[in-house]
Image (cartoon, rainbow, N blue to C red):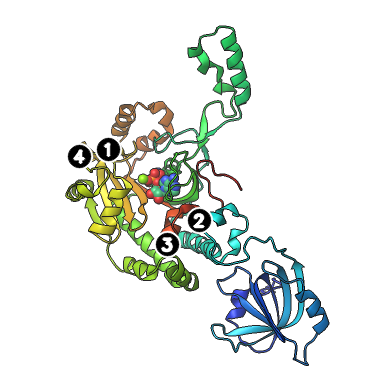
Amino acid sequence: MLLLNTMKTTLIKDLLVSQPDGRAVTVCGWVRTMRDSKNLVFIQVNDGSCFANIQLTFDRNNPGNANPQEIENELKRVSTGASVKAEGVIIPSPASGQAVEVTLQNLVVLGESPSDYPLQKKGHSVEFLREIAHLRPRTNMIAAVARMRSQLAFAVHTFFQERGFQYFNAPLITCSDCEGAGEMFQVTTLDLKRIAEEGVKAGAKGMDPAKAENLVNYSKDFFGKPANLTVSGQLEAETYATALSRVYTFGPTFRAENSNTPRHLAEFWMIEPEMAFFELEDDMDIAEEFVKYLLNWALTNCKEDMAFFDQRIQKGLIETLTHVVNSDFVRISYTDAIKELEKNNDKFEFKAFWGCDLQTEHERYLTEQTFKKPVMVYDYPKEIKAFYMKLNPDGKTVRAVDVLVPGIGELIGGSEREADYDKLVSRIKELGMNPEDYWWYLDLRKYGSVPHSGFGLGFERLIRYVTGMGNLRDVIPFPRAPKLADF
Ligand code: 4AD
Ligand code: MG
């Protein structure tokens, strides 16, 4: 027989939508507030399973009270933040804004919460909450964000699984630099202090400082050569896409960019689909479908949390996202985008010109002012994009696409990949990289090469977009950024 009911407690989200039929229930959670007015006691309890609290009520005048003295004793230990286990009966609530409440028949305080509990009052600043990152999920805001992350992770898997993609796990430690930007965290077991000491001694012996690099012997390092945390799982995903046709990664990536901005994290989660037999137009189609699917998922399946974000975090958010779901994304070439930006150069700190890398101010202008909806910019100059992108016949631009959205700027970066062996080798050489380091990647172009494309969506940028939160540091549980790895 299948045991469906393996959980001993009922989640508040299930209680709140169940029949208030007077049956006995058990509620577990953390006390948000307690109000004791003479004969009536109200306790609001939250267990994070949904936005709303459940109200526990205790009426001292009720002659039917089961354990009045035990309850009184426990009530003395109840305060904001305390954890409780309550038993009672579920009844219709006379109070407005809640359908049901629980009449207390038994109460156990599992853990008291002394008066120095930092979340006594509502309305703390996000900066303060970051300092108590271990407790902030007990706030309405961070709990709602956490549920949204979980929901959208499920949506990501569902989207791809429905479309015949295989989930692929890229390695986190790698010896190649996918984006070629050199923003990597080194992974080493070499003892830096000992190497430095040897350097000092060698200097004292009059050794040539120019030979200092010889002191670092990578053959003695764990992998026998320099290794780093991955900045992207794309190159490895290409190997499986050119075997399984459609794959996607969903995992952590690491970038040591020294950018202290609300848009960057040093550790972030990226979703990277990679599709064989897809050209750039197909890539753009699925990227657009994907973004709309995720927004629609949030609007449909996370209504209560979305209502909170709409009212308290970004006014009009639901309307904005609904509009995005129902409209076509703009598709514009980099060259045309630059023409548009040049007309407005007086508004930019950094003047736009053909060949420049688009700055955040440019990206946001295009999506927020010019078009007022998501914009896909494609065919960028090869100089400002990574080595693996397919060269256009003009020899100057590559089949890249960035998806820009209002409030965020770049949400997605992708491209069609160079599938021609010789062109890829010459591009690698042009950039001063060594083709031997990419022998396995080049093999994909040697044996049964196919047109293929993919993109990367930063999961935290997506969550920020959907929730209206102002900073990526508040949409990931424990943010990593320059000088920030405290928890
Ligand atoms: O544009 P990027 O660098 O593209 C790649 O890594 C490709 N290999 C993806 C692919 O084609 N498979 O990064 C992709 C996305 C960006 O659009 C952005 O959303 C996010 O990753 N991203 C970051 N998110 C948070 N913090 C950072 N430091 C980020 N850098 C990139
Ligand atoms: Mg990019």
- Describe the element under mark 1 as helix, strand or loop: helix
**Helix, strand, or loop for circle 3?**
loop
- Residue 142 vertical position relative to residue 8 in the rendered view, above or below: above
**Label 3 vs label 1, nearer the camera:** 3
Q: Mark 1 or mark 2: which comes first in sequence?
A: 1
Q: Label 3: few (<14), some or many (≥20) within 10 Å?
A: many
Label 4 near ligand 1 (CB < 8 Å): no
Residue at which label 4 appears: 393
Q: Could you say which disc has been placed on residue 382 in the image?
A: 1
Q: Nearer the viewer, residue 238 or 74?
A: 74
Q: Secondary structure at mark 4?
A: loop
Sequence-wise first label, 3 or 1: 1
What residue is shown with label 2?
A: 474
The x and y percentages for residue 293 are 39, 64
At label 4, the amino acid type is: Pro
Q: Quick one: SS at disc 2?
A: helix
Q: Which residue is mark 3?
A: 468
Residue 17's image quarter?
A: bottom right
**Residue 62, x across and y down, in percent:** 75, 91
